Amino acid sequence: METHKRKKKRGPISPGDIGMAGLFFTAVFHNLKVRDGKPQAARIRHILDLLTELVGWNSQSFYASSQLRDALSRYQWRGRIMHSPSRGFQGLFTADRDQLSEDDVWEHNVVGELLKLVQYPDVLSRIRRCRNEDCREQFFALRRADQEFHLGRCRQHFYD
């Protein structure tokens, strides 16, 4: 059997995974705009900011992890195990829907998915705030790892 050598070593997360994360964050940021002004959106934005500070562990990361622990203390999930023929056993954590509003269930679900992404610093490092001071919108840098602006017009306004 012949073996093939790769010229480039694949990083901890593949471009396809970055694309899937991009789809997730596109939906999250859309829902944040829809829920703008609601406390759930503010809490999600705060958690996103704290998660980005964890990348590249430093003294600021230690402070962020402490704040993150406090921010996450409000969330509770019910755990259960499910089995599927294709994936085997999986642990699922769901919000207690009986006592939560629709916005609270959305918030819990987003936080749960964000916690799964903590193990992928490549993904977290792509969550940014637009460099344009007039915008400062959160976005996911899908196209380029060094992307600084969430829209072309923000980049243009910054350099004008």
Image: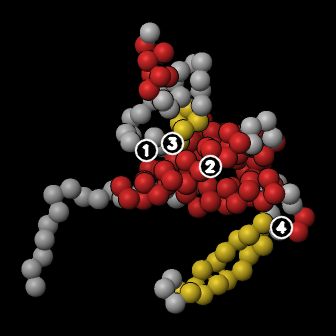
Where residue 97 is drawn, which disc sits there? 4
Q: Which residue is mark 1?
A: 142
Residue at the spot x=56%, y=87% of the render?
84
Mark 2 is surrounded, within 10 Å at the Cα level, by few (under 14), some (14 to 19) or many (20 or more) other residues, namely: some
Give above or below for 103 relative to 42. Answer: below
Q: Which residue is mark 2?
A: 28
- Is tag 2's residue or tag 1's residue first in the polypeptide sequence? 2
- Is tag 3's residue or tag 2's residue first in the polypeptide sequence? 2
Where residue 140 is drawn, which disc sits there? 3
Quadrant showing the C terminus: top left
Q: CA distance from mark 3 to mark 2?
A: 10 Å
Q: Amino acid at mark 1?
A: Leu
Mark 2 element type: helix
Quick check: marks 4 and 1 in contact, CB under 8 Å? no
Quick check: marks 3 and 2 in contact, CB under 8 Å? no
- Is tag 4's residue or tag 2's residue first in the polypeptide sequence? 2
Residue at the spot x=38%, y=42% of the render?
143
Mark 3 element type: strand
Quarter assignment of residue 142: top left
Q: Amino acid at mark 2?
A: Val
Q: CA distance from mark 3 to mark 4?
A: 29 Å
- Is tag 3's residue or tag 4's residue first in the polypeptide sequence? 4
Q: CA distance from mark 2 to mark 1?
A: 14 Å
Q: CA distance from mark 1 to mark 3?
A: 6 Å
Residue at the spot x=59%, y=26% of the render?
136
Mark 4 is surrounded, within 10 Å at the Cα level, by few (under 14), some (14 to 19) or many (20 or more) other residues, namely: few
Residue 59 shows up from this direction: no
Quadrant showing the N terminus: bottom left
Residue lying at the far left of the rendered structure: 2
Q: Position of residue 146 (x, y in %)?
A: 39, 35
Mark 1 is surrounded, within 10 Å at the Cα level, by few (under 14), some (14 to 19) or many (20 or more) other residues, namely: many
